[in-house]
């Protein structure tokens, strides 16, 4: 089936319908969506001129100023004190000083000094510029304590005063999004801290294809960021952990050399979802030195005010991150990490969503927030800051939709709405996909732990039902490409490299489909008489919904 025929069917369906699930279809708003506008905005945001849009750089400032002018052109109401779109986000940048940072292993009194970049890298220490620790190593499996899922790696081990060693994953037996949650390092490290650990070493199983070691090293050289609270303390700085190490999995056997166990045995148990923990009979000595820099980061927040006097103080929040990795290690003689798909695309789609709302003859009942946030690449920082520091007095956020490299290299026949199974937002997903003649597919690659990897997760943690929509892998009969392979291949070859630029086969009609589905879901949510709710007994609702 050709794209033009698909589009024709969708338009015919739209024209033949006036109501669906009791709500009118906003046909004029959908017709206002312009694929060329998405391409134009992406082209500018991912140009070399903007130097990869790393927070605190001239390139990011240029990108932010451009988006600010688009907010003005769209007639969005400034959210900051009613007169500014700019929400300041104070950031601390940390870069590990490699030559002054060391890691040694002591086995039966014999020292082995590991090589930085080859064997391991450190995460910056955002609390202590000069951190040192010498302590025994203990293996704690995945480092997961999940009594609600009948799983506990800590049940037979005392980690107080020790450095925990853990796999950078979670049991495959968990549900897709629960697995993603327990893979998150913030969850793992806070659990270790609660139990008295003083350091952490993580490594991946050999089959983990989320990133190559070379890509991990390249990224680490650009430093990282944390946002600062009113006391100038770094949020999620993990103060109790003197050192956080990422170990090259090729050398994981070193950690088990004195334990009586082999790394292969560990991987087999992990694959079988067996909780495991034991002392490694090795002591590690580490020293990490971090250089700090203050960076004044910023979000942009605009508002479309709701039309219902009783509901306009409730907000549906759309968010997309503007930042990328800036200028870094060269790949194929290119050192500018343009971030076209990640995430110039999401910001461009977000502007078209705002455009669709402005094309409505009447605003929806609830208000709409359009948030362009910073620091997603460094730990969802801008969205986390926003969710914890709402700029609008008495605002109540009821739902979030995050747009982040949603995949539009081919016609979209199905979507994967991460988060829909957890809340009543599944109803709005059903409405939107019915109108657009789209199928709904499950998570095609749970091992990628997508559910915790974009800005919607900042809202989940505040108890707000949220969605993060990607395209699925369904194909038309004449399509010779296996999308399940090509999309995954993109992640391993282009993702987070300078080759994520505009020289890619983007399908901007498909990008417009992402605008439509996200717009419709938010529109229907904003017009519901009741706010979205977590499903009864839901894992995330139970953990954060209170």
Image: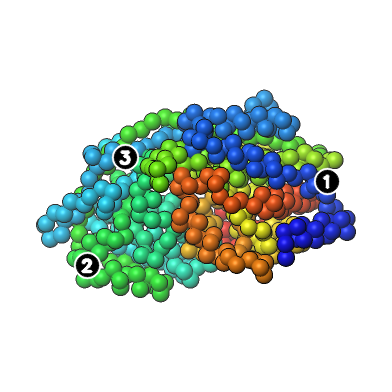
Question: Pointer 2: what residue?
Answer: 259
Q: For this rendering, which residue is in front, 77 or 323?
A: 323
Q: CA–CA distance between discs 3 and 2? A: 30 Å
Question: Pointer 1: what residue?
Answer: 28
Camera-nearest label, 3 or 1: 1
Question: Pointer 3: what residue?
Answer: 96
Q: Which quadrant: the N terminus?
A: bottom right
Camera-nearest label, 3 or 2: 3
The mark total stands at 3
Q: Which residue is found at the position 50% from the left and 36% from the top?
A: 48
Examine the rendered structure and indicate whether residue 220 appears above or below residue 278: above
Q: Is residue 206 left or right of residue 57?
A: left
Q: CA–CA distance between discs 3 and 1? A: 53 Å
Q: Which mark is residue 465?
A: none
Q: Which residue is found at the position 49% from the left and 56% from the top?
A: 491
Rendered location of residue 191, percent (x, y): 40, 55
- Which numbered disc flags the more N-terminal residue, 3 or 2? 3
Residue farthest to the left?
Answer: 109
Pointer 1 local density, CA inside 10 Å: few below 14, some 14–19, many at least 20:
few
Rendered location of residue 533, percent (x, y): 68, 56
Camera-nearest label, 1 or 2: 1
Rendered location of residue 284, percent (x, y): 21, 53
Examine the rendered structure and indicate whether residue 528 appears above or below residue 312: below
């Amino acid at each position: 089936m050709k794209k033009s025929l698909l589009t024709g069917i969708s338009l015919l369906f739209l024209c033949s319908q006036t109501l669906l699930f009791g709500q009118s279809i906003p046909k004029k708003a959908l017709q206002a969506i312009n694929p060329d506008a998405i391409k134009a905005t992406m082209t500018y945001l991912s140009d070399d001129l903007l130097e990869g849009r790393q927070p605190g750089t001239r390139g990011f400032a240029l990108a932010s100023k451009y988006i600010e002018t688009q907010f003005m052109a769209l007639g969005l109401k400034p959210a900051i004190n009613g007169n500014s779109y700019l929400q300041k986000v104070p950031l601390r940048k940390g870069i590990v000083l490699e030559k002054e940072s060391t890691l040694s292993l002591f086995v039966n009194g014999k020292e082995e000094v590991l090589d930085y970049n080859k064997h391991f890298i450190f995460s910056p220490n955002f609390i202590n510029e000069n951190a040192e620790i010498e302590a025994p190593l203990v293996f704690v499996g995945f480092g997961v304590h999940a009594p609600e899922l009948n799983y506990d790696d800590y049940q037979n081990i005392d980690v107080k005063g020790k450095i925990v060693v853990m796999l950078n994953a979670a049991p495959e037996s968990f549900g897709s999004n629960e697995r993603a949650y327990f893979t998150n390092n913030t969850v793992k490290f806070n659990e270790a801290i609660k139990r008295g650990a003083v350091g952490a070493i993580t490594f991946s199983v050999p089959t983990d294809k989320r990133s190559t070691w070379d890509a991990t090293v390249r990224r680490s050289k650009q430093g990282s960021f944390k946002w600062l609270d009113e006391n100038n303390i770094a949020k999620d700085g993990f103060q109790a952990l003197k050192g956080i190490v990422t170990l090259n999995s090729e050398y994981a056997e070193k950690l088990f050399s004195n334990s009586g166990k082999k790394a292969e045995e560990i991987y087999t148990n992990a694959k079988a979802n067996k909780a495991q923990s034991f002392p490694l009979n090795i002591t590690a000595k580490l020293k990490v030195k971090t250089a700090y820099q203050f960076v004044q980061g910023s979000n942009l927040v605009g508002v479309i005010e709701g039309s219902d006097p009783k509901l306009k103080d409730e907000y549906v929040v759309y968010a997309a991150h503007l930042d990328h990795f800036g200028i870094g290690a060269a790949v194929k003689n290119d050192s500018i990490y343009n971030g076209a798909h990640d995430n110039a695309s999401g910001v461009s789609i977000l502007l078209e969503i705002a455009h669709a709302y402005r094309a409505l003859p009447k605003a929806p009942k609830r208000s709409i927030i359009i948030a362009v946030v910073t620091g997603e690449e460094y730990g969802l920082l801008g969205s986390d800051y926003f969710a914890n520091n709402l700029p609008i007095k008495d605002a109540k956020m009821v739902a979030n939709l995050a747009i982040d490299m949603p995949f539009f290299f081919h016609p979209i026949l199905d979507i994967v709405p991460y988060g829909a199974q957890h809340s009543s937002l599944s109803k709005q997903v059903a409405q939107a996909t019915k109108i657009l003649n789209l199928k709904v597919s499950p998570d095609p690659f749970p091992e990628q732990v997508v559910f915790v990897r974009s800005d919607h997760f900042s809202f989940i943690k505040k108890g707000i039902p949220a969605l993060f929509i990607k395209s699925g892998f369904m194909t038309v009969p004449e399509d010779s490409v296996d999308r399940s392979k090509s999309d995954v291949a993109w992640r391993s070859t282009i993702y987070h490299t300078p080759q994520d630029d505009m020289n890619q086969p983007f399908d901007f009609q498909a990008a417009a489909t992402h605008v439509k589905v996200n717009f419709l879901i938010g529109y229907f949510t904003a017009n519901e008489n009741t706010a979205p709710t977590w499903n009864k007994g839901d894992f995330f609702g139970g953990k954060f919904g209170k």
